[in-house]
Amino acid sequence: MSAAIKWTADALNAWHKAMVAKHGWVIPRLACADGYEVSIQASAGHYCAPRLDDGHPYSSFELGYPTAADEEFTDYADDPERPLDTVYGRVPVDVILQVLEKHGGPKR
């Protein structure tokens, strides 16, 4: 298994910017060391702050369709009754980093 890395807000924003440059405004899911995956999006069409294309650094992101339910995201859920099949709007970067750390950090 690939070694996990610990991220900061700057690292998350740098990853997002690089992924947008490579894939456009809808980027692939982020995978963690333990196999957890989640969609992390930000643009004028996503629930994030700032709600702009290329608004780096973003202070919050839109998440979606995680492979496991995380109680840290519950308050941001569009549909908390379906935690694996919903969107999470305006999730603060520090909350995202906490969950990524819990899952072993992003894979290299």
Image (cartoon, rainbow, N blue to C red):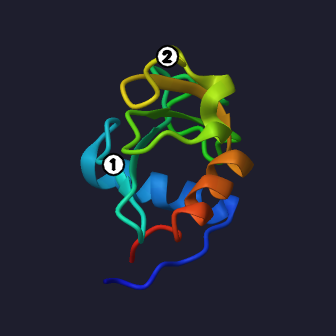
Q: What is the distance, in whole Å, between disc 1 and disc 2 at their CAs?
A: 22 Å
Q: What residue is disc 2 on?
A: 81
Residue 19 location, x and y as percent? 36, 54
> Residue at (63%, 38%) from the top-left corner?
71
Residue 36 location, x and y as percent? 39, 56
> Residue at (47%, 79%) from the top-left corner?
4
Q: Say whether residue 90 is visible.
A: yes
For this rendering, which residue is in front, 32 or 53? 32
Q: Left or right: 51 with respect to 86?
A: right
The kind of residue on which mark 1 rests is Arg
> Residue at (41%, 59%) from the top-left corner?
18
In the rendered view, tell whether residue 52 sits above or below residue 5.
above
In the rendered view, tell whether residue 102 sits above or below residue 2.
above
> Residue at (28%, 55%) from the top-left corner?
22
The kind of residue on which mark 2 rests is Glu
| Quadrant the C terminus occupies | bottom left
In the rendered view, tell whether residue 89 sits above or below residue 107.
above
Q: What residue is disc 1 on?
A: 29
